[in-house]
Image (tube, rainbow, N blue to C red):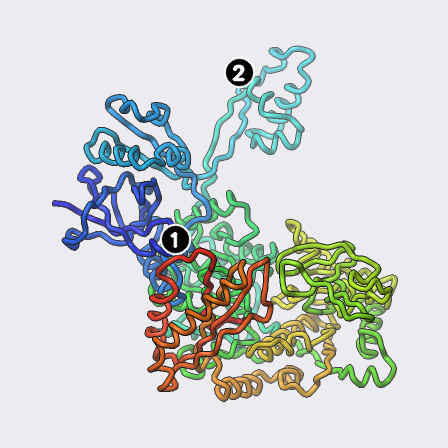
Amino acid sequence: MNRYCDVIISNKSRNTDQAYTYQIPNHMGNQIDIGKRVLVNFNNGLIIGFVVSLKETIDKNIRNIKNILSVIDNEPIISHQNIALAYWIREHYLSRYNDAFNLMYRPLSKIEIFIKTSNSLPDNFNPEIAGKWIAFEKIRKELHNKQLLGEFDNYVSDGIVSMLSRDLSFETEKTTFAELIDRHYLEKLKSNSHKQKRILDYIEKNGNTSVTELINDLKSNIRELKKLEGKSLIRLYSEENHTKRHVDNLKPESIISLTDEQNSIINSIVSSEKQKFLIHGVTGSGKTEIYLRVIEEILRANKTVIYMVPEISLTPQTINRFKQRFGDRIAVLHSKLTISNRNEEWRKIFDQEADIIIGARSAVFAPVKNLGAVIIDESHEESYKSSSIPKYDTIEVSEQLTDLWNAKIILGTATPSSDSYLKGMRKEYEIMTLTKRVNQLQMPEINIIDMREELDDGNKNIFSRQLQEAIIKAFNMKEQTILFLNRRGYSSFMSCRSCGYVVKCKRCDISMTYHQNKGLLICHYCGATQKVTTKCPECESQYFKAFGLGTERIEEEARRLIPEARVSRVDQDTTSAPNSFEKIYDSFKKGEIDILVGTQMLAKGLHFPNVTVVGIVSADLTMNLPFYTANEKSYQLITQVSGRAGRGNKSGKVFVQTYDPDNYSLVHSKNNDYIAFVKQELSLRKAFRYPPFIDIINITILSRKEESAQKFVIEKHSEIRKNLNELIVKRKVLMYPPMNNSIYKINNKYRVSIIIKYKKGVSTEIKNCLRKILLNRSYKDVDISIDINPTSI
């Protein structure tokens, strides 16, 4: 009886965005399974695919079905739950199958192929491709010919040739050791063999030694070791780096005593049959300890936990805190890992050597096999929304994943998003509140400084008088200060006061930022650089200067205020090198830095007990963003940055500088009154028809040719509007005319958007319409990006 399978092809074209049916050869028997990768002949090329379903019958109209050529995996590498999740992502975020399934898969594969034949290969085949393991890409190039691959396909079907395949990235990494096997080595060495004697002395003293460690310590090389092995003085051998999984290595008791609020929340989560929880706790209220205790209980049930934090919070200190509690049960996934390290962490999870996965948003796709909970710390963070296709929301994906596993999801933050809190109000989440800091610490005192009054009083400094006095006092008391500005660089732009010329990026429709430390103007969108001139490039006027503020300027002014202070800066420019953020973090924690200047990196749950002063230099930057979430982002940033003050035994003070002191996000953050803020925010969102009460789709058309972008968007807007006309008439859909994006050109691509607002009940109709009109084919000069409920436009 014939058997068949549906395969998702690893191909980026929209024209191939579907599952393809292949026949399973009889000799493969039970090798084929859902979730395994296979090699197939697709469009006259050798290609990798994922098996997503098995079946015994097919539509009679399907003809010329090809056979599966080879099975790569010994066991499924994508679970049934993650396959279902990939299907959901494709439908919900209007992506391609290939984009959705690639999220579930390890970062890089090392696939090799072995072509086995009982006879010699036919004359038209290269004999060098048979009888040995060869990299997939090399075989693919050899068979990249319609006739050749077709014949090869037939040989496999007829049993003349068989194709084996394997993925070396699944093999456990090994460490090579050196063992001394002849302790009378001095008698066998020549008198001038000083290097070899040092090696043998080292092994005799330290015992069996890692070759890497030995070479590094002695500045030696593998050739010397091979010589010693050839003389039968040492033995080189390898061992797999397996991490043994221990189910009983939890500490019997945690040393931190819990507050009544913490105890109540832990007991409720562990004992409740409910699955969705939102922990709303003020900064410093001990949310992390709650996570750790809940994880302990989940591990006792032999289940796995995914714990996510914003990327920058993945400091060694965060990971070490978990390792101190749970030992070697942890795997870490984030973008700064090398490919080999990321592969090894993925393998540990897949082989169930780790049952706690710590990572940024991509950790939600880890290959877990028995999920017990997903915990999302600082769940309000914008970084949980993917900026690349598919533009998924990690919280939405986690909700779907935990439903598939019947697991718990726990969100934690001091400043919940309006969307999350509304779900709590509607009983979709159980809201749990922490109203007090641990150890009876007081919340910091927040002062709103009206910079208009400072200017009227003759203060033209970027720091208000109150902030200056507080910084100086903290320095004299050997306390620390954080100065926050969410804009890097020295100045935001350079302009001529004579003719008004502003230096803009040639590839982007945006002004370039002045970086004094580098002596360059840099585009923060495409990375283009330009040398700074002293005269205006347009009129050659001398009145060509930098305007606006950046973190470099704040750092300079802080040094000017207290010349003897140790000032450091943490932003994208100072933390691009490996471990650079950790070095600054450690120095500040140890008290080696008096004043730390930074961007929103400083707002992500960091704990500095000696910080008593926080200055938010310009709150208006976030409040004046041209998007409906501006006030929510402002409230969150101010509250989170303010929360860095007063976390030790000393009280904290926060100074928020603004030209709009009556803005409700500032008023409520000063009073630490989240409930009042979210009620006002939700009221405005409902009145003006914004999420979470309705949904928004932003369709962005991108093209290097401006005319192509404009023509395409006008045509498709008309077509979409015609298809949705009935819903528009019923006021279930609001469709705006095409509009150029606020930054019209980025990296030489013009960007035009179609924005659609719609009631949640008509989501399926709208998405079906968009897939039919926009997504079922590829276009020559145009790219399409779709974002559901975007965080910015």
* Res 17 visible: yes
Q: Nearer the viewer, residue 268 or 333?
A: 333
Above-or-below relation of 704 to 634: above
Checking the image for residue 176, the label placed there is none
* Res 253 visible: no
Q: Say if mark 2 contacts mark 1, CB within 8 Å.
A: no
Residue position marked by numbered label 2 in the rendering: 230
Q: Amino acid at mark 2?
A: Gly
- Image point 46% across, 48% down: which residue? 107
Would you identify the image quadrant in which residue 26 lies?
top left
Q: Is residue 158 left or right of residue 701?
A: left
Q: Position of residue 643 (x, y in %)?
A: 65, 73
**The N terminus: image quadrant:** top left
Label 1 neighbourhood size at 10 Å, few (<14), some (14-19), many (20+)? few
Closer to the camera: disc 2 or disc 1?
1
Would you identify the image quadrant in which residue 767 lies?
bottom left
Residue position marked by numbered label 1 in the rendering: 13
- Image point 60% across, 26% down: which residue? 203
Q: Position of residue 158 (x, y in %)?
A: 19, 33
Label 2 neighbourhood size at 10 Å, few (<14), some (14-19), many (20+)? few
- Image point 57% across, 83% down: which residue? 674
Question: Reading the chain from its start, which is encountered first: label 2 or label 1?
Answer: 1
Per the model, the C-alpha gap separating discs 2 and 1 is: 55 Å
**SS for dot 1:** loop
